[in-house]
Amino acid sequence: MKLTPSKINTFNFFKLPSVFFTGVRVKTIDNNTCTVKVKHRWINQNPFKSMFWAVQGMAAELTTGALVLAKIRSSGKNISMLVSNNNATFTKKATGKITFTCKDGHLIDEALKKTIATGEGQTFWMQSIGTNQDGVIVSTFNFEWSVKVKNKK
């Protein structure tokens, strides 16, 4: 089953309500790129009248995680996924509509091949960049993902 923005957003409503209710929405996903948008609103703001860093983090992680999930599903294997490390840089107040984009889907393929072949866990870093409606970068998030074939019991 191919992951679509609609399927991911519906999943978020039922399984990740904080993502859904803060306005985080997947807009596009393909083999190598995922785009997520979120609008600065009362429910996701900090006391400084900009978007709370954690909401930006949820949107950024979703761009990377959706790509990992899609690749795992297309592999047909039972593989676990987990964020094992992350860091972020904030360069401008996040107000208005913020778009997070990850273009690192190609990095997942090699890690999945290795974990399937060896049974050992693999890690790789993916980046998501958040820009405002003027195209100015507001934040950059890096996530280290760990993937491993699950043992059959």
Image (cartoon, helix red, strand yellow):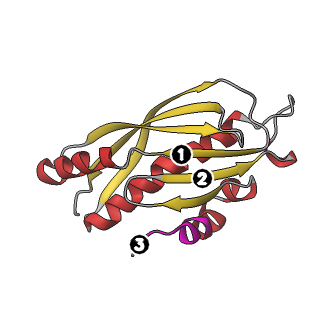
Q: Is residue 11 left or right of residue 110?
A: right
Q: Position of residue 103 (x, y in %)?
A: 43, 45
The magenta stretch is 2-9
Query: CA separation, marks 2 and 3?
Result: 17 Å
> Which amino acid, mark 3?
Lys
Question: Quick check: marks 2 and 1 in contact, CB under 8 Å?
Answer: yes
Neighbourhood count class around disc 2 (C-alpha, 10 Å): few under 14, some 14–19, many 20 upward: many
Q: Quadrant of residue 71?
A: bottom left
Residue at image coords 61%, 62%: 12
Q: First in sequence, mark 2 or 1: give its number.
A: 2
Q: Which mark is residue 54?
A: none
Nearer to us in this view, 120 or 69: 69
Which residue is at 71% across, 39% downward? 134
Q: Quadrant of the N terminus?
A: bottom left
Is residue 73 or residue 152 the one in the foreground? 73
Q: Which mark is drawn over residue 2? A: 3
Quarter holding residue 123: top left
* Residue assigned mark 1: 101
Q: Is residue 27 left or right of residue 1?
A: right
Q: Is residue 145 left or right of residue 122?
A: right
Mark 1 belongs to which amino acid?
Thr
Amino acid on which the number 2 mark rests in the picture: Val
The answer to whether mark 3 and mark 1 are in CB contact below 8 A is no
Q: Which residue is mark 2?
A: 36
- Magenta stretch contains residue 121: no
Q: Nearer the viewer, residue 149 or 54?
A: 54
